[in-house]
Amino acid sequence: MSLGSSSMMKVGTNSYSGLEEAVFKNIEACIQLVRITRTSMGPNGLSKMILNHLEKLVITKNASAIATEIEVNHPAAKMLVMAAQNQALEYGDGTNLVVTLAGELLERAKDLLEQGLVVTDIIAGYERALRHILNKLDSNSLSTLIHRPFGDLHDKKQLALAIKPALASKQSGYEDFLSELVAEACIQVIPENPRLFNPESIRIAKVPGKSIMDSFVVRGFVIPTLPRGAVQRMQNCRIAVYGCAIELDRTETKGTVLLQSAEELLDLSASEEKAMDAKIKEFFDNGINVIVSQMSFHDLALHFCDKYNILAVKIGSKFEVRRFAKSVGAALNMTFRVPEKEKIGTCSEMTIEEIGDKQVIVARDDGSTNITNDSGTAEDAGVNCRDITTIVLRAATQSVLNDVSIAIGNAVNVVKATCSDDRFLPGAGAAEMALATNLHDLASKEPGLQQYSIHAYAEALEVVPRLLAETAGLPADEVMTEMQSKHVQGVDYTGVNIDGADENGEWTLNTSAAQIYDNLAVKAWAIRMATDTACNVLRVDVIVMRKQAGGPKPQVPGQTEWN
């Protein structure tokens, strides 16, 4: 008779418990994931080449993209992947910090467990350290770490400086050009109240060819297709957007028509033409001069669109159709009929332009759309125009386009975070080192066992400047010693000089003078996510694996189960 927890479970169920079987194996799996992503941190971080299950080549240094593409199978390591994905959804930037810091916290926790500390004390110390950091970064805090260097977000130079570190960490060498490009796109759509800035107003169109330096900004929405009919351009557009085919309604049941003469056949065709003519004329009478659909256009529909001078556009992607509808303020209709007035979108102009060797449709919006009725007088469009800006990316390969697109998306999210919270921290690892120094002071005053885990938390934070030094090819020990010395003296804005030693032989720099800042909201959320994830992994002491339904999957040669 079998004993233990397996005796009460179905055959094929595996159970693991205790430090050796559950906790240490979970920590080891997370550390293995972190070893893949940690070398991608910083401007000199290395990219990873991944061939996914669809044999699509992905070259990126974005931690969230790396963790998603490699399809992590271990349940504990998946928690790190989900934390990085949540960080990407919330702020876009800081995903590598989440994964790296969580892995370092778990590695330090493993050392403490081997020394005899219990999980409860470690988690309590980590949570105490997190509360101390969040209090330090609170909106009412008078900490010298917090800066407000960018007062006017409508100024292109200030906005470019705010997003430059986020771009430098992913596209080193192009950060100056890309930061100005993103800033130019953002200032065109940032409203008077910056808190109302919508990242969806910034679109990205990827056109292969030339180099990144040939990218530019278009005031409007770029659609990589051509019109379906003869109408190629439209001014003062009133737009109806559909997710269905542009054709006459069909009956739900099959029907048979008995024709006894050629005249009856002609009458049948003529009735279909009259019905389509009346349908398209109804759009014309309601002032709609652009029809956009995800599905196909019937030949008769295209004929009468040309007759009534209506621009017909097909966008094959359902996601792009929704983005276009949201950009122009239209509602996506699923039946082919004239929409209500409030569901009609507007823009100033839709025209064909040539980018490289590719022709695209550009929907521009200058903020003033005048619609004229049959008598020639202007009337209210009924819907406020949306500001739309598209960044047209150029690069030699699709992989580079995808990677730069992710970096620009992160930068736009940083702009959104900056519009909501204009507080910044010193960059280049200065904020992490300052917080670590502060935590060491806190731990030295702590009488209980939590002091060891607070010290471990501080050491985990120090991995950020250490990685910046290592990826830049600098002597990490010398850089860390110099930084620690200055931070102990209270110089909180001392960061890593990734360009090497200056004329005085110093490996550090003044981040305020160099204007290197990280957004406080992004950094605080990343630290919170990393700490919560590490604590959740440590709380697991039993793993139960049920037998997979449908039988075991075929084993790939050389592949083993996670356990």
Image (cartoon, rainbow, N blue to C red):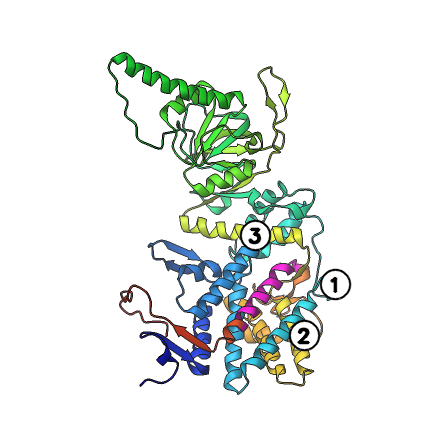
Q: Position of residue 140 (x, y in %)?
A: 74, 63
Front residue of 96/295: it is 295
Q: Amino acid at mark 1?
A: Asn
Mark earlier in primary sequence (3, 2): 3
- The numbered disc on residue 140 is 1
Q: CA distance from mark 2 to mark 1?
A: 18 Å
**Residue at image mark 3:** 411
In the rendered view of the protein, which quadrant contains the C terminus?
bottom left
Within 10 Å of disc 1 (Cα), the crowding (few <14, some 14-19, many 20+) is few
Amino acid under label 2?
Answer: Asn
Using the image, tell me which numbered label, if any, was put on residue 480.
none
Q: Is residue 472 above or below residue 254?
A: below
Q: Nearer the viewer, mark 1 or mark 3?
A: 1
* Residue located 30% across and 14% down the image: 266
- Single out the residue that lies furthest toward the left: 260
Q: Position of residue 338 (x, y in %)?
A: 50, 28
Work out whether 32 lies above or below 304.
below
What residue appears at the point 60 percent right and 62 percent down from the top-left corner?
525
- Taking the image as shown, residue 526 lies to the left or right of residue 231, namely right
Mark closest to the chain's N terminus, 2 or 1: 1
Q: CA distance from mark 3 to mark 2?
A: 30 Å
Q: Is residue 520 magenta?
A: yes
User: Which residue corresponds to the image point at 38% horizontal and 84% vertical from the top-left?
Assistant: 4
Query: Can residue 174 be seen in this snapshot?
Result: no
Which of the marked residues, 1 or 3, is nearer the chain's N terminus? 1
Look at the image and give the residue range highlighted in magenta: 514-535
Q: Is residue 203 visible?
A: yes
Q: Amino acid at mark 3?
A: Ala
Is the residue 418 above or below the residue 506 in the image? above
Q: Is residue 413 covered in magenta? A: no
